[in-house]
Image (tube, grey):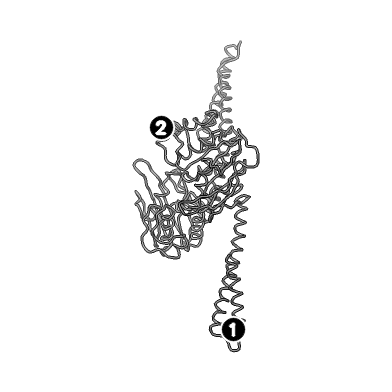
Amino acid sequence: MLLEAHNLEKGYGIQKLFSIDKLEIGEHDRIGLVGANGCGKSTLLKILSGQTEADAGDIKVSCSTSYITQEQETEGDTSAYLLSCMNLKGSACKSGGERTRLAIAAAFSRETKLLFADEPTTNLDVQGIETLEKMLKGFKGAFVLVSHDRYLLDQVCDTIWEIEDEKLRVFPGNFTAWSEQKSREREYALFEYEQFQTEKKHLESAMHQIKHEAEGMRRPPKRMGSSEWILYKGTAAIQQRHVQNRGKAIEKRLDKLEKKEKPKDLPKISMKMGAEYPMEGKNALTAEHIKIAYGKTTIIKDADFKISANKCTVIMGPNGTGKTSVIRKIVEQDPAVRFSPQARLGYFAQDHETLEPEKTVLQNVRSTSNQKESVIRAILANLYLTSRHIEKPVSVLSGGERAKVMLAKLLASDANFLILDEPTNHIDMYTAEALELLLKQWKGTLLIVTHDRHLAQETGERFLFFDKGEIRTFEGNWKEYETSKRRMEKAEDSVELQRTLLNMKMIEFTARISAPRKGERVELVREELERVTEEYYRLGK
């Protein structure tokens, strides 16, 4: 074992985070650590990595460790190769994405057998996340990964740790396996609750019948003589004792009946979201000759694209390729953008600037909605904003909670065209999955900018990819895109192999021209070198 821990406890003040009897990390374990916001995931990682101390318990570490966190100042030498892998030119980085990439490169540069990573995808674009994924897959040691990136957890983890109700549970398999197991547990809990309710009703009915029988025995029949009464009284007493004994037996069964709580269901939404004002025609939006430039640097040269009506289009691409600038042109209704006449726009911005801080959650959502309060409350509940949240002013909420309020406000509005800019950035995985379900129910037009591959997989019907000054359209879902991408990468690998072989021939022919073999015609070798060189550069185009 690389790490063993026993009887770990941690809390802050009167609030206990967790109490863990035992945990182990083996040599090749790939562990994903999940749980609701505030359950103690980051704290546990810091304790295991030696960054902070537990309130109680013992930890034994038998190997060197590395720790990735966005707040960490990177120290020590970083491999030039790994810097290159993370698309970094040096260790002097300024942006959040660059700092994250540097922290990752630095951690993998150290020769460690155990890696701890706390939200390493923060500020990374899809390309950066995919690079991290490859590095984790190729890592020869063990790791514990805290992440809200469900797709990444699926790809790299073989075990899931979950902190729930102050305890740590271990699940074999990746994120999908854990999610399916949780779903089965919920179904079984619902089955147990229904069995409990059935048995309880049966016993209560039997008790009611016994009480009815007992009441009847207390009333003697009419017109009964004294001798008959004495005889009846004795017989009734025996019968009453039997009834009482039956009643006591049933009471014991009721007392011993293990109480089962009903699993909480998210309330159903009685509205067809986005369908109240349908759009006619094929396209919700047409953009022509889009140009984005910062000073003398051109980001997007001259791009055209369309957004299909009543479909979900997902925008993806590296940081700095103009995605936010294009969204801004759309939201500000730039002359280069033409909307469907029926389009009613709703915009989710990462800063949630359209919320009124002094008003409550419910007031904010109601201010732009014609829906009944019961529908609004159902939407809020589906995003895990319960009764204890909705009467609070927005000013006291966390960033993640504000994001949920903004999403609820849009879903409850009369908009039929939603533009969502990184909607899962500040919410936990439970809310992200709930949001996906709500977006699947959305009947209008969706345009989503995201680095979240799981969200893209669950919602995307067509894609716009921003890269190298261009906007490429892919018609199809994420699975179809991944298949197409693998096919292209295979073709690119084949081309790269051909270029390598041609390069080897170029080196050989150059050497033969410099030192010709006996009887060899140099002009023929030179012609062959020219042919090979031409082919080499043709494949590079």
Q: In the image, 266: left or right of 361? A: right
CA gap, disc 1 and disc 2? 85 Å
Instruction: Give the x, y percent position of residue 208.
Output: 57, 25
Q: Is residue 166 left or right of residue 532?
A: left
Judging depth in this view, the residue of 279 and 259 nearest the camera is 279
**Which of the 4 image quadrants contains residue 335?**
top right
Measured from the top left, where is residue 120 in percent x and y?
Answer: 45, 53
The foreground one among 246 and 300 is 300
For the view shown, which residue lies furthest in the bottom direction? 518
State whether residue 459 appears in this view.
no
Mark 1 element type: helix
Marker disc for residue 232: none
Give the residue type at disc 1.
Val
Q: Residue 43, relative to residue 525: is it above or below? A: above
Q: Is residue 288 visible?
A: yes
- Mark 1, residue position: 522
Corner quadrant of residue 437: top right
Q: Which residue is the extreme one toward the right?
A: 281
Q: Crowdedness of circle 2 by 10 Å Cα count: few (<14), some, many (20+)?
A: few
Q: Position of residue 461 (x, y in %)?
A: 61, 47
Q: Is residue 390 above or below residue 284?
A: above
Mark 1 and mark 2 lie on one chain; the one further toward the N terminus is: 2
Task: Locate the N terminus and report the quarter of the image it occupies.
Answer: bottom left
Residue 242 or 458: which is nearer the viewer? 458
**Drawn side of residue 85 relative to residue 220, left or right:** left
- Mark number displayed over residue 358: 2
Q: Does 249 appear above or below 187?
A: above
Badge 1 local density, few (<14 within 10 Å), some, or many (20+)?
A: some
